[in-house]
């Protein structure tokens, strides 16, 4: 191979490499899917934040319902059907406590909530104050926090001594 052929080969390789560099290094940015939200009193509220706050509340205040709800989520995912969480009174002395259970059929008046994994939905049936705070409470809490943060920023309260 003479020097002119080597130069031609070098130029061809250079053109191929230079032509490939932009194509090979270009990354495609796909738009991120926005998490599900809803508007509450004029504030955009992420459903996941509200749902997580509700689950944390249950874990701290009603471990029986929390446990049954988690089991219902798992069962609904594995069985691909709606799973119900029911509640039965358990009498201990003069105090009445409740036991929570899951069922694949609606226990009618005993059902507190149900879970449909395929729709990522929790349906509140006979959920009440004895079970825990409603999810709307946590939406209110998030809304107040966002409005307070916005007001503090507008008033520049961080600059006060």
Image: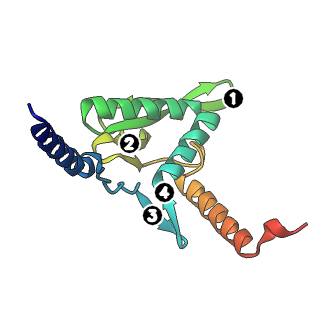
With respect to residue 93, does 125 lie above or below?
A: below
Q: Secondary structure at mark 3?
A: strand
> How far apart in space, not on screen, are marks 2 and 1 (Cα)?
30 Å
**On the image, numbered disc 2 is attached to which residue?**
114
Q: In front of the other: label 4 or label 1?
A: 4
The crowd level at tag 1 (other Cα within 10 Å; few <14, some 14-19, many 20+) is few
With respect to residue 127, does 34 lie above or below?
A: below
33 vs 82, nearest the viewer: 33
Task: Residue at 64%, 37% (x, y): give it.
Answer: 61
**On the image, numbered disc 3 is attached to which residue?**
38
Looking at the image, tell me whether mark 4 or mark 3 is earlier in sequence order: 3
Looking at the image, tell me whether mark 2 or mark 3 is earlier in sequence order: 3
> How far apart in space, not on screen, are marks 3 and 1 (Cα)?
43 Å
Q: Secondary structure at mark 1?
A: loop
**On the image, numbered disc 4 is attached to which residue?**
46
> How far apart in space, not on screen, are marks 4 and 1 (Cα)?
42 Å
**On the image, numbered disc 1 is attached to which residue?**
94
129 vs 93, nearest the viewer: 129
């Amino acid at each position: 191979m003479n020097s002119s052929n080597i130069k031609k080969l070098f130029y061809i390789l250079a053109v191929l490499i230079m032509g490939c560099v932009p194509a090979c290094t270009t990354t495609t940015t796909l738009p991120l899917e926005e998490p599900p939200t809803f508007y509450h009193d004029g504030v955009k509220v992420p459903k996941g934040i509200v749902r997580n706050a509700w689950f944390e509340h249950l874990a701290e205040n009603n471990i029986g319902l929390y446990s049954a709800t988690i089991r219902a989520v798992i069962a609904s995912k594995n069985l691909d059907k709606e799973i119900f969480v029911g509640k039965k009174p358990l009498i201990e002395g003069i105090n009445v406590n409740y036991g929570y259970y899951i069922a694949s059929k609606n226990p009618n008046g005993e059902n507190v909530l149900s879970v449909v994994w395929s729709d990522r939905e929790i349906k509140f049936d006979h959920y009440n104050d004895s079970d825990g705070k409603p999810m709307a409470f946590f939406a209110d809490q998030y809304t107040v926090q966002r409005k307070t943060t916005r007001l503090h920023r507008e008033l520049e309260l961080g600059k006060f001594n």
